[in-house]
Amino acid sequence: MAPFSWKEIIKTIPSLAARLRLYLGSAIALPLKLAPMLNRMLGVRLRLHPTWAVAFILIIAMVVTQFPEAYPVWQRVILGVAASLLFFIAVGFREVILNFLALNRGIPVQRVTLFAFGGLPQIPKGNTRPILELLMVTAGLLINLVIAGILYAVHSALVNTTHVIINGIILWTAYLYFLLALFHFIPVFPLDGGRLLRTLLWKLTSDYDRATNIASWAGQGLGLLLIAGGILLLVLSRQWFNGLALIFAGWVLYLAAVQSRRQTALREALQHIAAKDMTIGESPIIATPQFTVGQLVRDCILVTGQRYFVVAEEGKLLGVVTIHDIKRVPKKRWNRTKIGKVMTPAGQLRTVSAQQSAASVLELMDELGIKRMPVLEKDKVIGVISQDNLNRLKKTRVELGM
């Protein structure tokens, strides 16, 4: 068989452009459509990290360049899309099992960021223990090996059949997942090996946050080393695909480790700050239910640009109204519609007490998937705390080295 030549792809680019857009768009769009289903299966909020788009492109490129050239390029692109989706399903299935086990063991997983190597769960540190972490790490490593084994078993069952194309897709997916399973044994966070390292450090130091930071620093360091190694492969040996794959692995690991450290830093920064302190200078305009939508738009929204308003009478919280509530009202009815008719009633809102720690408020926001919450003191509304305020405080403290 003649060696692969990029000239083949270059010559066929005009005819492949429409197909590439269609197939690549499907590869990236389908996981986004599957995310709500995974959310229901997991019982937690799932966020797909943008690195998945790059992962799909790399997998498609790998299949196109490595699959037998007896198949036209457009067919290899389709096979690459199928392999990327199968890989995504395998990683997603791993997270379904892990988070089911976590919830079954009483670990309240609030949110999972799904990177190309797996999920980075956000769990309140007070709701887990070293022994539970050890069980989850062991389960993660075993699940990876089982999934890789199943894929290789399916490949072995099809190797002597006429399903050559299907077998090829499964073989490539099994190969990728086996590499992923080995990758997770490396003791850097947030890989499974790194979670094991954090568990050991946590047990030794009795400090969860410190253990997380040390393991995350190790993850950042390895990520940078992988990126440097990939660049060397590109420059010195012209191993384009291997070099790009190594750079991608290092980049994803670095980003995941950085996100983990930021979560820890934010929690530490907000632990000793009360919710009422976060409302200073940020209190929303408090309206009465007798305001019309037109008055609120003219006097408040168009003047301040604010999008979230507390509705109260004599300090008692009645509800909140947002710009999304207002947009549901036809403009011709704005001057006749009271905001009390379109607001979300107080009974449907989650509120926080003035003395509650900002860290616990942020965890609650993550758990509920909301960005703002009214703050009450002695049953009187004193303002609103928002995720933007909390993140801005954390950024400021980091800049000042606090």
Image (cartoon, rainbow, N blue to C red):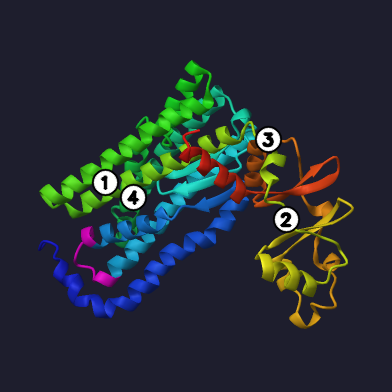
Q: Is residue 373 left or right of residue 126?
A: right
User: Which badge, 4 or 2, is on the more N-terminal residue?
Assistant: 4
Residue identifier under label 4: 155
Assess disc 4: are there few (<14), some (14-19) or many (≥20) residues with their C-alpha within 10 Å of its C-alpha.
many
Name the residue at 33% across, 50% down: 155
Camera-nearest label, 4 or 1: 1
Look at the image and give the residue range highlighted in magenta. 65-74
Q: Quadrant of residue 99?
A: top right
Q: Is residue 107 above or below residue 91?
A: above
Residue identifier under label 2: 284
Q: Quadrant of residue 302?
A: bottom right
Name the residue at 72% across, 52% down: 283
Name the residue at 23% across, 60% down: 67
- Give amino acid for label 3: Ser
> Is 229 part of what is drawn in magenta?
no
Residue identifier under label 3: 357
**How far apart are the two marked residues, 4 and 2, measured between alpha carbons?**
60 Å
x, y percentage for residue 76?
28, 66
Q: In this orientation, which residue lies closer to the viewer: 91 or 398?
A: 398
**How far apart are the two marked residues, 3 and 1, measured between alpha carbons?**
42 Å
x, y percentage for residue 41?
60, 49
User: Which badge, 2 or 3, is on the more N-terminal residue?
Assistant: 2
Q: Is residue 320 left or right of residue 324?
A: right
- The label on residue 246 is 1
- Give amino acid for label 1: Leu
